[in-house]
Image (cartoon, rainbow, N blue to C red):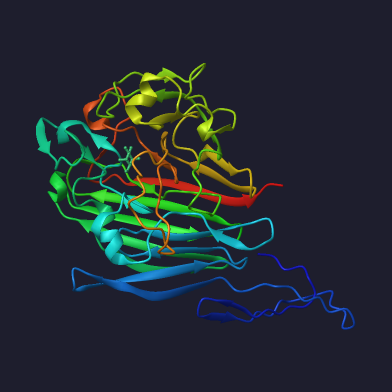
Amino acid sequence: MKLNKKFLVIPIVLGMSLALVNCKNDTKKEDTPVVEEMAEASIIKSNFGMFQDSIPVEKYALVNANGMEVDVITYGGIITSLKAPSQDSTFQDVVLGFDSLEEYVEGSPYFGAIIGRYGNRIAKGEFKLDGETYTLPVNDGDNSLHGGTAGFDKVVWNAEEVKDGDNVGLKLTYLSPDGDMGYPGNLETTVTYTLQADNTLMVKYEATTDKPTVVNLTQHTYFNLSGNFDNTILDTEVMINADQYLPVDAGLIPTGELKSVAGTTFDFNKPKKIGAEINAEDDQLKKGLGYDHCWILNGTGGEMKLAATALDPESGRFMEIMSTEPAIQFYTGNFLDGTLTQKDGEGTYAYRSGFCLETQHYPDSPNQADFPSTVLKPGEKYETTTSFKFSVQD
Ligand code: GLA
């Protein structure tokens, strides 16, 4: 961040950290000192409990110079807290999650987690690759969801702090062994979260394999931009940059059709309240119990392009998602049922109190030859990037 003001100084207490920063100044006038609140970007590490009584889990708080903070734990690479800017320049937590590791381990609906090896569903937990049939654990009706019974959301990742100027990040790595959850190949996976000075969280996914396999990594944060988890997300205004979506069957597997959103409740090309049509008489909404579908992003593919935006009209909190991925799963928290406890330990997460926008390839691609391929071969590099930028609209 550029500091064009005169002087400096700022004691800001961020959790346990106190940063005092001296700002350089060429045009300094001794008689008119300007005091500006500004801190150095920092990474604060703390203990977040013990997985299976033996593996320590750490929490890393990434804090930028503005005071925006993203907390990540090494279990599942989970974003446990994301404090986004508010109109009054304070920051409020806008992601669903828990206070303790136990709650994440005992039954989280993928709150904040890295999803792998395969985001969303693979029909009947089975796919063929190079003539070989692979069988995956089935954990969602007849299908395999989000990498199976113990996907990347349920393992402890290695973590390395990354500091680059005003950017603070965490590089998470995990080696998924050949045969892990039924998938072939040793998959070396890296997910790097970087919190930038402009309040953008960059998420970079990388993977390599030593046998042909399929990969579809994503991030499963549930947002509630109101910052009040007692509110539903129905008033949030969402835009999805997509002219087509994938209709699903009763098990939420894409039928294979790419359907135009024009004239349907699935048209989010212009910002629309999530709740505007969510309860409409619509066969697809009935199947998803609301929105739980994959939209095909406009654009030609590999480039970083606008995927979606979300605005909480009350607070003005605004999120812009860009991605190199061809699609985005929009899920409106239809399975939340008020049984999970909020972070403050008081309220519970009610039906539709969070929404997910998961950038990814299409669900069930390994079984659908017409969908863009998710095959990764030895010698190739899987590389995708998604960014979440937070700001405030008046
Ligand atoms: C994804 C799926 C949903 C649901 C959630 C997790 O978004 O598409 O059907 O499984 O994850 O609860």
**Is residue 141 shown left or right of residue 33?**
left
- x, y percentage for residue 155? 24, 59
Q: Quadrant of residue 100?
A: bottom left
- x, y percentage for residue 63? 53, 68
> Which quarter holds ligand 1?
top left
- x, y percentage for residue 2? 69, 65
> Is residue 274 visible from the viewing direction of this image?
yes
Residue at the limit of the structure toward the top, as seen here: 263
> Is residue 127 visible from the viewing direction of this image?
no
How many discs mark residues in the rendered view? 0
Residue at the limit of the structure toward the right, as seen here: 31
Residue at the location (63% across, 43% down)?
313
Q: Quadrant of residue 142?
A: top left
Q: Quadrant of residue 47?
A: bottom left
Residue at the location (33% across, 56% down)?
190
Image quadrant containing the N terminus = bottom right
**Is residue 251 shown left or right of residue 69?**
left
- x, y percentage for residue 98? 37, 61
When the figure is inspected, residue 93 is found, relative to residue 292, above or below; the finding is: below
Front residue of 285/66: it is: 285
Residue at the location (35% across, 35% down)?
361
**Is residue 188 shown left or right of residue 312?**
left
Residue at the location (30% across, 21% down)?
256
Front residue of 226/242: it is: 226
When the figure is inspected, residue 24 is found, relative to residue 256, above or below; the finding is: below
Front residue of 279/217: it is: 279
